[in-house]
Amino acid sequence: MTNNQPEVGVFTTDADLIIQVWDATLARLTGISEESASGQALTALLPDLEQRGLLKRFQRSLNEGVVEVLAPAFHHYLVPCAPVNPAKHFEKMQQRVTIAPLRDDHSIAGLLVTVEDVTDRLESERELATRLSAGDEVTRLDAAETLSGDEAFDATPLLGSLSDESWRVRRAAVKGVSQRAAPEAIAALLNSVVENHHDPSLLNSALQVLASTNVDTLSPLLELLNGPHPDLRMQAALALGEQRNARAVRALIAALQDEDTNVRYHAIEALGKLKAVDAIDALADIAEARDFFLSFAALESLAKIGDTRVAPRIVPLLEDDLLREPAVTLLGELGDESAVAHLAAVLNTPTAPTNRIAGALANLHDRFEKQYGEGAYIAELANREISPTGVQNLLDALETDATPDKQELRSIALVVGWLKRPGVDRALTRLMGRDDLRDEIIEALVRHGSATSDLLIAQLTAEDLEVRRSAVLALGRIADSRATVALVNTLREESLAIDAANALAQIGDSQAVDGLLTLIGNKDASIRQAAVSALNAVIPASMSKRIIPLLHDPDPNVRESAVKIAGYFGYPESAGALLELSRDADERVRCAAIEHLPYVEDERALDTLVHALKQEVPNVRAAAARALGNMDHPDVVRELIEALADDNGWVRYFSARALGRRRSKDSVDALESLIQNEKFNHVRIAALDSLGQIAESSVGIEDRERIAGIVRGLVRDDDPDVARAAESALAKSGQRE
């Protein structure tokens, strides 16, 4: 062969081990022709089969139905023959053989045997093993990377390279051995560790392998943990933590009394990684001893374990300058409401670690909110306990040039937002222009509620655009009608018009109608849509009288917006105008009118939509398909099924979606055909989603089983989105893959 792919020959036998098939590849590899082999007993063709102990492997596969593998390292070959290419190290072709049962309906009818020529690979392995001992690093590295990168190679030659003088070679060896760690390789590693513990490079590389393998190495590591060498005990503790084996906890707790500080340190860390609840008291004892090196590690491990019972023992450590910060963090993660007063007491000092305390209080708040829905209780306690000094510490932390990270900013702003103190809201508004703080400051101002409205309204005329934008967003969320007039004035500023319209929608004050109506003809579609959405949210009693005349406005932008409002509210008196506008000269107006016809409940609407679905341009046909999905009429399903054959992909897409909303089992055949023949995956996904909706409705069990049969084959589709849609539809049919 001219490529590097291994050659694999195949033969089959019947239940009496008579050869039935001997393929051409195997004939070429072995020199035994198909005519010579076929019909012979396997033991006649290979007379030494029983003598070599291989016959029983074939019999076991026949009798027990198991797959047997003959590894070249032990058996070398099944069929004795010369290598295809001359080999330096092998007289006979080296073969990897797999023996698998062939089954008929009720029994094992024979065997299928594959014979892979691995001679060239084993030759390469031996050459690479030789190069691993070369004098220059480049050669050794190339050999190590080649052996590591191809899992077909045996990893055993790499064991010696774990102690190579080159860290690059060691890294490649670690990668290769860890990916293919077998029990015998692990045993060899442990022996190397025991014999060469004085070699740091070998020790570190070996333990990296131990940490990354799935082979159980607990017992050997525990032996090392109790051994006479401190460096081995230390590394064993480290590896036990990385392997996440809870059975190591007792031994690691005992190691907390080790005479060597480094061993104790790594045992502490390992217990944290193992989340060892049984170690809480021992770790708390170490924290209380106030030996910074070990106490710091103990606090971190207690945080990882996460048992709240330890929190009261940590409070006294807030008085220790060296351990205060980790103690603060731990109380934020594990403390209860009583921790607020202790954390606030530290915050109220001139040298408080403000960022750390704010983070702890924020964690406490979030935890109470998630577990009990009582985050506000923590906020109330903090507001009561934090003094003017603490308030100033928080504000200084927000305004400092030494900017904390994003999470710290969020925590500080969150805590500041709890504080109902004079001057806090003004300080917050001063910071609205900072890009790195805007979201957090808005959140804080919103929590202050309408008390900050006047301050925010004043910021609507600030020089900085982003300050004005932040004020608009905050006023919308506070929803104080006192801001309506100022926000209407802001609508004139095009860069803020959308945000201001959204804010007015949240407030819902009818005083905004006149200002919003000035935007419905705006050339920017996004601004028009924001104004329409806001007007739909305001709902003044007289809205229909303002909107219906605009359906005849000469500006198509105004007509389109008026249609969206009249259709949204379903004004009965607008039905005639909407039917007329479904034939408007402007395509966008026609689309809007068509989409909203179902909401005015006019008997002429169905005929208009069907006509549009068949005769209009693609965008209007797609709008008609969407609209028909919202109409409850027996003819709708038939028209949508016909539209699945439309020459426009989006018309097919929206027709498929609409059929899902109609949930008619009469559309199952058409949707199945669409899935099978459609070239666009987004259309197939729509059809699958609709089948799922139909299966989820009140159709019978036979229909659900039929739908399941349609979608099951697509669960493994090459497109992951199609596969997910199929899986969802299958679940809705009451079945799983």
Image: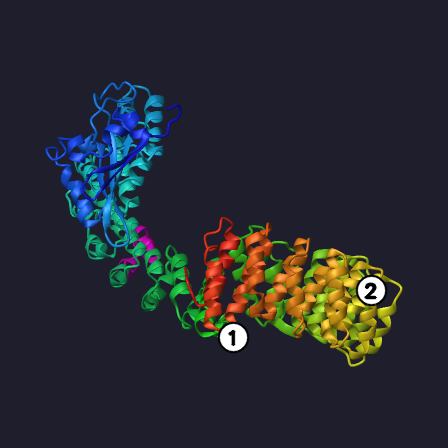
> Which disc number belongs to residue 583?
2
Are there few (<14), some (14-19), or many (20+) residues within 10 Å of tag 1?
few
User: Which residue is at a point 71% across and 66% down the rendered structure image?
Assistant: 502
In the rendered image, the residue lying farthest to the bottom is: 541
Considering depth in this image, is 349 or 655 the residue closer to the camera?
Answer: 655
Q: Does the magenta stretch include residue 468?
A: no
State the image quarter where residue 147 is shown: top left
Are there few (<14), some (14-19), or many (20+) residues within 10 Å of tag 2?
some
Q: Which amino acid does label 1 sit on?
A: Ser
Q: Where is residue 492 in the image (x, y as percent from the top left)?
A: 81, 62
- Kindly identify which residue carries mark 1: 698
User: Which residue is at a point 22% across and 42% down the rendered structure image?
Assistant: 14
Colour theme: rainbow
Q: In this image, 370 relative to 576: left or right?
A: left
Q: Where is residue 624 in the image (x, y as percent from the top left)?
A: 72, 64
Considering depth in this image, is 350 or 642 the residue closer to the camera?
Answer: 642
Considering depth in this image, is 414 or 478 the residue closer to the camera?
Answer: 478
Q: Give the range drawn in magenta.
A: 284-299
Q: Dot 1: what SS?
A: loop
User: Which residue is at a point 45% across and 58% down the rendered structure image?
Assistant: 712
How many discs appear? 2
> Which disc number belongs to residue 611?
none
Q: Dot 2: what SS?
A: loop
Q: In this image, 236 relative to 624: left or right?
A: left
Q: Position of residue 438 (x, y in %)?
A: 63, 58
Q: What residue type is labelled 2?
A: Arg
